[in-house]
Image (spheres, grey):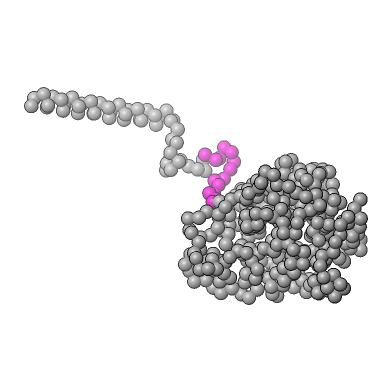
Amino acid sequence: MARRIVTCRVITCLALLTFVSFLVFFQQGSHMGLRNDNPFSKDINVEDTLNSAKQKPGKFTQDPSKVIVPQNKEQEPQAQDQQQPEGSKQGETAENPGKKANGEAPNPKTQPQQTFAVDDDLFFDPSGPKPDQVVLLMAGDGKGHNGEISNLLQLVTQNRQEYADFHGYNFHFINITKYDLHGVHPVWAKIPAILDTFISYPDAHWVWWLDLDAIIMNPEIDLNTHILSHAAMSSKFEIVEFLKGESKHTGKFMKKSDPKDIDILIAQDHNGLNAGSFFLRRSKFTATLLDFWQDPLYMHNEWAGKEQDALLHMVQHHPQIREHTGLISQRVLNGYPEGGNHMGWRKDDLVVHLAGCWVENKCNERWSNFWGKRITIEDLKAKGVANPTDHTGMVTKLTKEGTVYVPME
């Protein structure tokens, strides 16, 4: 019994000695300025830690393009001009963009796919893609500056679908309300929309993004002879300087390029690159570009041009991105209602884009004007053009009067 008492006292003394030693150690550490690595410590002043760099505390931002998990809430009915167009391959009902048409609710644990497949042996024909390897992408939420145009979604769906059907292209609509952008402007939704389109169409070589406030004016023009064949592409390149807002210089120029190396086809105006109408090619480069393009640092930046300025930033400061970018004449895909021979739409040009019409409150007026000027499929049939014309050996050319076909050089 006596031995047990002695043993217990020895253990108690050792424990007390250990406690006192630790207490002294930590008291010394506090006077010696030992670093506190606890990120949740109340003693750390975030403002003080940033003062030496003259910075302000940042805000945490989540991944920008995750698909919203739909809640079982009663949703307001959509206006007629905001309903999902017929022929959309999203498989969603117009009443509930997150609910499958067959009534099966999506798995809330399923994460959106973040990239698309690119075969190592993918071959791009120099004469251009087959019609079913092209996707004409349209996306929107029924809101925005162009919302004042009566029946906009219905009209533009008719316009794109007729063009796609005539040439055999795929037409695809995406309701962007399914994307959770965490408070940034809806224009950023075009990036996940393009990504989803490449996923939905695994055989697609090219995706054409075209804003809602644009009209296909001349459906007789096929994309291969206009821009996607190597011959047509080479004839439309502009070996000029990339510009910033108000025509400011970047000091970076597009170099003479081989079309086989080009993965993005885009035009610029006086404010820089305009992403209202552009092409992206399926490639590992494009998959990487889309990944970088939706970086939260870009999406939450206060750039005036938003996603367009982000793209220009990458083109200006990253040579490898610039080398894959084909700068083309604006009227090829993105002519404006007004402007000179380089910028302004001319008779028989493919597209007119009503960019900025909301500034002067002229969207409805300009839309009505150009909608009445457009060539329709019925107009083509009336003059005997029931099917796409074979333009083998030809490319389109932009003249002061308009777009014409000329022999390849």
| Nearest the eye: 388 or 248 | 388
Viewer-closest of 25 and 39: 39
- Label count reads 0
Q: Residue at x 84, y 47 (%)?
A: 240
Q: Nearer the viewer, residue 311 or 397?
A: 397
Question: In this rendering, is residue 3 above or below 398?
Answer: above
Q: Residue at x 65, y 57 (%)?
A: 201
Q: Considering the image in quadrants, where does the N terminus appear?
A: top left
Residue 57 drawn in magenta: yes
Dividing the picture into quarters, in which one does residue 210 lie?
bottom right
Left or right, 218 with respect to 29, comes to right
Task: Measuring from the top left, give residue 4's x and y in whole percent.
Answer: 12, 26
For the point 80% across and 43% down, the residue is 251
Q: Can residue 341 be seen from the camera position used here?
A: no
Q: Position of residue 325 (x, y in %)?
A: 76, 47
- Residue 84, given in percent of the width and then of the height, sits at 62, 69
Residue, x 85% and y 64% (percent of image)? Answer: 389
Magenta-span inclusion, residue 131: no
- Tell whether 218 sits left or right of 5: right
Q: Which residues are magenta?
A: 49-62
What type of secondary structure mainly makes up the magenta span?
A: loop
133 lies above or below 370: above
